[in-house]
Amino acid sequence: MKNTDNKNFFEKVYNVAKLIPYGRVTSYGAIAKYLGTARSARMVGWAMNGAGNMEEIPAHRVVNRVGLLTGKHHFDGSNLMQQLLESEGLKVVDNQIVDFEKYFWDPFKELG
């Protein structure tokens, strides 16, 4: 993939991430599937790695497929990702969202 392709893909990922509602979460794979690149969950992860400090992109709302905060080390402070999620009403225990299915937002279903 050329660098410009990566940049365009990252922008598409960021545009979807901006739509995740307050108090909800989605997964890297769900975003990849929505973008028509179901096997690109890891690339979505790379995009989110760079978005952890971009205020306009709620990267803390993107987790792995079972609700683990696998990207937490990309946020300033050791517990910032968890704190942001908890401030939105989610409960996190051992780096995993409790009742993940209840809070899961599927862009494929929600955005069509």
Image (cartoon, rainbow, N blue to C red):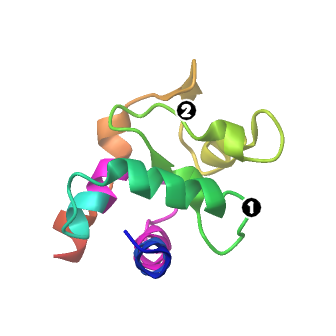
Residue 22, position as x, y percentages in the image: 52, 62
Is residue 41 visible to the viewer in this orientation of the structure?
A: yes
Crowdedness near tag 2: few (<14), some (14–19) or many (≥20) residues, C-alpha within 10 Å: some
* Residue at screen point 69% across, 45% down: 74
Q: Nearer the viewer, residue 55 or 8?
A: 8
The residue that mark 2 highlights is 91
* Residue at screen point 41% across, 55% down: 43
Is 60 in the magenta?
Answer: no
Residue 46, position as x, y percentages in the image: 52, 54
* Residue at screen point 48% across, 79% down: 11
Write the start and end of the magenta stretch as one range: 11-31
Q: Which mark is residue 53?
A: 1
Which mark is nearer the camera, 2 or 1? 1
Q: Quadrant of residue 89?
A: top right
In the shown orientation, is residue 109 left or right of residue 19? left
Question: Is 79 located above or below residue 45 in the figure?
Answer: above
Residue 94, position as x, y percentages in the image: 57, 18
Indicate the amino acid at tag 2: Lys
Is 21 in the magenta?
Answer: yes
In the shown orientation, is residue 11 left or right of residue 74? left
In the shown orientation, is residue 12 left or right of residue 51? left
Is residue 25 visible to the viewer in this orientation of the structure?
A: no
Question: Is 75 located above or below residue 19 in the figure?
Answer: above
Which quarter of the rendering shows the N terminus? bottom left
Crowdedness near tag 1: few (<14), some (14–19) or many (≥20) residues, C-alpha within 10 Å: some
Q: Secondary structure at mark 2?
A: loop
Q: Nearer the viewer, residue 10 or 57?
A: 10
